[in-house]
């Protein structure tokens, strides 16, 4: 199992639909982030541009990096922690575990290994069903500028919103589900730790 993939596509994995009537890609509202200086408006493109490069994710997700997410789904609300336990220039091993309020694992943690390009491409959303726009959001980690992706479900009845903060390469900081006029946050990063160089294993 590719652990980070389940994080990136949380809206789909939790079977939560959102609706917005998205169509083609739109231009950026604000200044573009380091990962991409312009929105690709080519109608032939099969996927939207990703929010980060593989190198940006690799530089951020060093050994010892941790992120804690709050999820809401069919099983209710719970916390998950993701920790980088090994990494090299091409691949990374990430340990995932459900945790309690004190950060103690519930059950046996799982470890999966993926390539950095695989992690980048988990956010390569289909262009024919999505748009991305510049956005500014207040989150549990602070206020950030970033890219908001709105991806319509295959059945056309809903969509999922993914917010990627420019300053926090990797997985989305927030994932929202909306049905009609109702919006629900189904995933949000609430803690994030990146060790200093001197602290790394």
Image (spheres, rainbow, N blue to C red):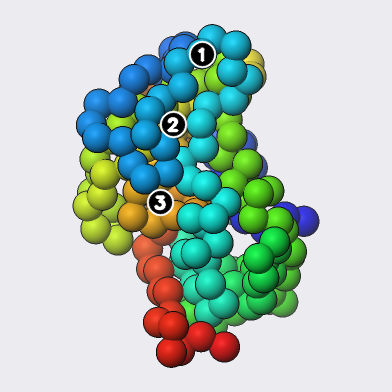
Which residue shows up at 63% across the image and 41% down it? 121
- In terms of secondary structure, where does tag 1 sit? loop
Q: Earlier in the sequence, mark 1 or mark 3?
A: 1
The disc at residue 176 is: none
Q: Is 65 on the left or on the right of 106, as rendered?
A: left
Task: Classify mark 2: residues with Cα within 10 Å, few (<14), some (14-19) or many (20+).
Answer: many
| C-beta proximity under 8 Å, tags 2 and 1 | no
- In terms of secondary structure, where does tag 3 sit? loop
The furthest residue to the right: 1
Q: Nearer the viewer, residue 77 or 3?
A: 3
Task: From the top left corner, tell me how far across and down residue 167 is, in percent.
Answer: 33, 55
Which residue shows up at 44% across the image and 83% down it? 197
- In terms of secondary structure, where does tag 2 sit? strand
Image quadrant where residue 101 sits: bottom left
| C-beta proximity under 8 Å, tags 2 and 3 | no
The disc at residue 173 is: 3
Task: Classify mark 1: residues with Cα within 10 Å, few (<14), some (14-19) or many (20+).
Answer: few
Q: Look at the image and tell me in which quarter the C terminus lies.
A: bottom right
| C-beta proximity under 8 Å, tags 1 and 3 | no
Marks 2 and 1 sit apart, C-alpha to C-alpha, by: 17 Å
Marks 1 and 3 sit apart, C-alpha to C-alpha, by: 27 Å
Which residue shows up at 70% across the image and 56% down it? 115
Q: Which of marks 2 and 1 is nearer the N terminus?
A: 1
Vertical placement of residue 10 versus 64, above or below: above
Select label 2 or label 1 by which is in front: 1
Select label 1 or label 3 by which is in front: 1
What residue is disc 2 on?
149
Q: Which of 163 and 81 is in front in this view?
A: 163
What residue is disc 1 on?
42
Task: From the top left corner, tell me how far across and down residue 192 is, in percent.
Answer: 40, 69
Image quadrant where residue 136 sits: top left
């Amino acid at each position: 199992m590719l652990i980070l993939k389940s994080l990136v596509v949380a809206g789909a994995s939790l079977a939560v639909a959102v609706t917005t009537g998205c169509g083609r890609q739109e231009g950026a509202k604000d200044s573009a982030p380091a990962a991409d200086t312009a929105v690709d408006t080519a109608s032939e493109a099969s996927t939207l541009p990703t929010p980060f490069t593989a190198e940006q994710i690799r530089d951020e997700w060093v050994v010892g990096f941790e992120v804690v997410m709050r999820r809401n789904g069919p099983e209710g609300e719970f916390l998950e922690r993701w920790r980088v336990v090994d990494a090299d220039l091409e691949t990374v091993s990430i340990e995932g575990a459900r945790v309690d309020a004190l950060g103690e694992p519930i059950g046996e943690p799982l470890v999966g290994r993926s390539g950095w390009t695989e992690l980048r491409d988990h956010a390569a959303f289909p262009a024919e069903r999505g748009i991305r726009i510049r956005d500014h959001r207040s989150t549990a980690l602070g206020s950030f500028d970033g890219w908001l992706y709105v991806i319509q479900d295959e059945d056309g009845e809903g969509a999922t919103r993914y917010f990627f903060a420019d300053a926090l390469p990797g997985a989305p900081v927030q994932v929202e589900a909306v049905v009609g006029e109702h919006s629900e946050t189904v995933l949000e990063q609430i803690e994030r730790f990146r060790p200093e160089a001197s602290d790394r294993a």
